[in-house]
Image: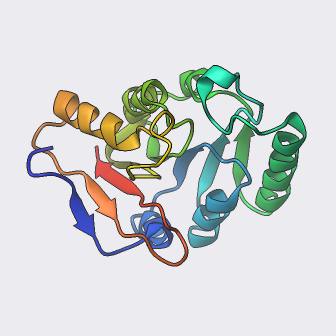
Amino acid sequence: MGAGPVSINIGRLELASLFSELGFTEGVEIGTEQGLYAETLCKANPNLHLYCVDPWRVYDNNLGYHPAITEQQVDSFYKEAVEKLRPYNTTIIKKLSMEAVVQFPDDSLDFVYIDGNHRLEYVVNDLVEWTKKVRPGGIVSGHDYIQYKYQHYSHVVEALKAYHESYRRGLPLFVLESRRGHKYRSWFFIK
């Protein structure tokens, strides 16, 4: 990544507005959970068709994501997301990210927002595979650019560093500020 990521004085709420200002109409959110950020994306961009990808199921313990979460809680998250996103042009895809990615042609999306499983292999897979689906000039973005206290779980920073060193050497990675109640930073790069 050269000298390191470039910090930008906007938050993820403004990122949603940026997508609208750029005229983005086709996007994917990986890791929709309760639909909070998906709703933000849709409110900011009334012309958006957003695909919401999340398995909404309990992971095996070895996956490390929300290890104490129950099936009942996951079902509640799914129902909440469906209800919250009902007024918008969304397509709910109840699959793992790598199961869903094959549904999309290469270069077909304006953006992807990655906020799924944060373990290294999952973040790297999401970066490699979903970047192919974003058109040139589109944006690959995501959440949780942090050194997290649960090191066994959150490897977003490490995955982005490895991805940039392998595929985007010398090209900028932008990291957004933490603002308005969002303590974890988002990031993006232009394809």
Q: Residue at x 38, y 49 (%)?
A: 147
Query: Is 132 left or right of 117, judged from the image as shown?
Result: left
Residue 178 left/right relative to 60: left
Question: Which image quarter holds the N terminus?
Answer: top left
Q: Position of residue 110 (x, y in %)?
A: 44, 48
Q: Residue 118: x, y in percent?
A: 50, 37
**In the rendered view, does 87 fall on the left or right side of 133?**
right
In this rendering, the answer to whether 46 lies above or below 33 is: below
Protein image colouring: rainbow
Q: Position of residue 79 (x, y in %)?
A: 87, 49
* Residue 47 sits in quarter: bottom right
162 and 97: which is toward the camera: 162
Furthest residue toward right: 72
What percent of the width, then of the height, locates residue 57?
A: 77, 31
User: Does residue 119 sit above or below 43 in this rendering?
Assistant: above
Image point (49%, 31%), residue name: 119
Q: What's the residue at 50%, 71% (across, down)?
A: 13
Question: Residue at the bottom extreme?
Answer: 180
Quarter-of-image position of residue 63: top right
Within the image, what quadrant is residue 58 found in? Answer: top right
Count of marks, rendered view: 0
Q: Is residue 136 above or below residue 59?
A: below
Q: Residue at x 46, y 52 (%)?
A: 144
Viewer-closest of 51 and 188: 188
The C terminus sits in image quarter: top left
